[in-house]
Amino acid sequence: MDNEKHVLALGFFDGVHRGHSALMERTVEVAKEKDLVPSVITFDTHPMTMVTHRAVPLLNSEEDRAGLIRNIFGIDDVVFLHFDEKTMCMPWDRFIEDIVENFNAAHLVCGHDYSFGYRGEGTPELLQKYCEDHGLGCDVIPPVMCDGIRISSTCIREFIINGEMEKACEYLGHAHVLTDVVRVGRRLGRTIDAPTINMHFREGIIVPRYGVYATEVCLDDGSFHFGVTNVGVRPTVDTSELVTAETHILDYGGNLYGKRVRVRFYKFMRAERKFGSVEELRAQIHADAEATRAYFAENPPKWPSGPQYAPRQFV
């Protein structure tokens, strides 16, 4: 443990949406005011998975959660604690004692609905009282609303599953992302003048509605490119039923096999469908590319490109 004092943001932060942003921004603000190190303490597994014995479908992998937090808010210290039965059964005050001691905390920040400890008995009110009694600072962030709806990971999951990607981006405050190592596919795209990169969704991560999306592709050299991404099972050329994200990167010709790539989803363009021939598929891919160019000409990505937004940590 270092000797520097920390301000800790507490939560699971699936999607790192606008509600989480208010919490992160307060964490950074307090760190600057009090000369503390801004840190995020989260879990590797969603607590409800342990409680209900049913996997919670997630918006992001651990890597993407950490990447969003680091790249958007500049909080480099993102710690994933292992959530197991011992953690689940820990009394709420013991949990707080442990993280305060282990991470040298001087200030804690959480959301209005944050719960912790055995049976979720720890509440923001109890956390505030604990901090007051122990000479620690504490902030509880109120809900953030959009269109009269409380922004939550749950509602954003529904948007993405239904293909309402622009709505999801509005609630997230940034583009929905998928990061993966580029896999070797069938290489059919090269034969029809539409090479693609092949990526998979990790187990437990939600899959957007099958179809074609206007995307932005971020490479590990920090460069950004527009892309056309098909999410689905490629019914024209494949019978395996394996769900993939295949992206045709516009105006790019490099070899990305084995490279880690981040795709940002902006707009659902059309549903996935089976074509009568490979030639028909080729023509549609090029039509999708033109539609994507037109979309971004009218709707430049709201998340700026530049060194501070580059994927500084592809882990």
Image (cartoon, grey):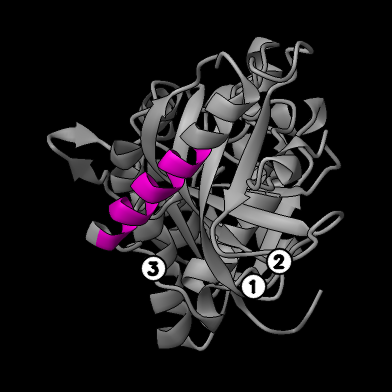
Quadrant of residue 168 in the image? top left
- Is 288 included in the stretch rendered in magenta? yes
| Residue 44 position (above or below residue 108) | above
- Is 107 included in the stretch rendered in magenta? no
Dot 1, how many residues are within 10 Å of its Cα: few (below 14), some (14-19), or many (20+)? Answer: some
Q: Which comes sooner in the sequence, label 1 or label 3?
A: 3
**Could you say which is closer to the camera, residue 199 or residue 37?**
199
Which residue corresponds to mark 1?
A: 76
Q: What residue type is labelled 1?
A: Asp
Dot 2, how many residues are within 10 Å of its Cα: few (below 14), some (14-19), or many (20+)? Answer: some
Which residue corresponds to mark 3?
A: 25
Which residue corresponds to mark 2?
A: 103
Place of residue 36 in the rendered image (x, y in percent of width and height, measured from the top left): 55, 82
- The residue sitting at 35% across, 62% down in the picture is 301
- The residue sitting at 59% across, 21% down in the picture is 119
Q: What residue type is labelled 2?
A: Phe
Q: How far apart are marks 1 and 3 (CA)?
A: 14 Å
| Residue 59 position (above or below residue 127) | above
Task: Please tell me whether mark 3 sits on a helix, a strand or a loop.
Answer: helix
Q: What residue type is labelled 3?
A: Glu
Place of residue 191 in the rendered image (x, y in percent of width and height, measured from the top left): 74, 41
Dot 3, how many residues are within 10 Å of its Cα: few (below 14), some (14-19), or many (20+)? Answer: some
Q: How far apart are marks 3 and 2 (CA)?
A: 20 Å
Place of residue 87 in the rendered image (x, y in percent of width and height, measured from the top left): 75, 34
Q: Magenta residues?
A: 285-297
Side (left or right) of 214 relative to 1: left
Place of residue 156 in the rendered image (x, y in percent of width and height, measured from the top left): 39, 32
